[in-house]
Image (spheres, rainbow, N blue to C red):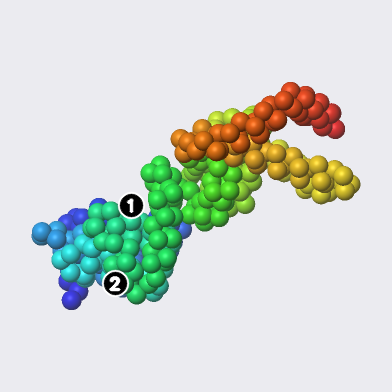
Amino acid sequence: MTRDTELSSLDLRYECYRMKNPAIEVKLLASIHERGIDEPLEGVDVEGKAILLNGFKRYRCARKLGMEIVPYVSLGEDEAAGIVAVLRASNNRSLTLLEQAHFLDDLLRLHRMTTAEIAETLARSKSWVSMRVGLFGEMSGKIAEKVFSGAFPAYAYMYTLRPFMRMNGIPKQDVEAFVEAVSGKKLSLREIEQLAHGYFRGPEWFRQEVDRGHLTLVLEKMNQVPPPAEGCNEFERVLLKDLEIVQKYLARVLSKGQSKKIENRAFHAQAHFLLGGILSRFSAFRKALGELHDRTAKA
């Protein structure tokens, strides 16, 4: 049953579980100003409190318009059951993948439901649940705050940063620094992707410029660099690919080499042998790279 509820009485503890999208809220604000709230807000009634679970954009629009009373529907008196109800309806309500992941993580950690119980309740597979829980578990609190607040695009995290973290072994603190540097700058997805490639795979000066907030400068410099294959012969294209591989695996070894997971005696013996061979050629390798770097700087 829908009932009228005072806006000020709603408990907003789950607001950080839902994505903010300023562009959508601008349109919604105009609609509510003209027609009012068509669809009631939803939550659960626990110990005399109306805890909001769905309708935060409508809530914020109502507050901006000075509305004191809003339509509200209770999903019951149990938080876990209310979350399950929101997740069940997520296909119709466009709950994002990360929003689903945040709620599922809550069911596991705070409400002590098992993966099997959640999967059965939602009529989903256990892998469906595990994938989303794992996805949310990969995010640090700082990154989650930027993504869910709308300061950093969720799509850019999912399809640009996450692959970098998984494939290149980029330390989480470096990813946090990048997200902090570019958040809230109204960059396109393409620009974020360009900056990420330069930040994690480019020279140190590039990272320093991004950290200082000189984003326009580094984007202009990147746009001046022609595509890798343009004007290159076959030998040069192969060498560029080799350099990309070297850069990629340097980052991976630097990250993994500090891991506390290294403990097997067989690994130590084989790694020691391999490292001896690498280090014996390292001075020559570094010299060759330096000479090539100087040659390319003159082009």
Give x and y (percent) for residue 87: 33, 68
Contact? badges 2 and 1 (CB < 8 Å): no
Dot 2: element: helix
Residue at the spot x=14%, y=61% of the render?
A: 46
| Residue ID for mark 2 | 121
For the residue carrying disc 1, how many other residues have a C-alpha within 10 Å: few (<14), some (14-19), or many (20+)?
Answer: some
Left or right, 240 with reference to 262: right
**Residue 122 placement: quadrant:** bottom left
Residue at the spot x=80%, y=28% of the render?
A: 288
Give x and y (percent) for residue 83: 27, 64
Residue at the spot x=68%, y=38% of the render?
A: 247
Quadrant for the N terminus, please.
bottom left
Quadrant for the C terminus, please.
top right
Left or right, 185 with reference to 1: right
Give x and y (percent) for residue 28: 39, 64
Dot 1: element: helix
How far is mark 2 from mark 1, CA to CA? Answer: 24 Å
Left or right, 12 with reference to 185: left
| 13 or 295: nearer the viewer | 295
**Residue 131 placement: quadrant:** bottom left
Q: Disc number at residue 16?
A: 1
User: Residue pushed farthest right?
Assistant: 233
**Residue 92 placement: quadrant:** bottom left
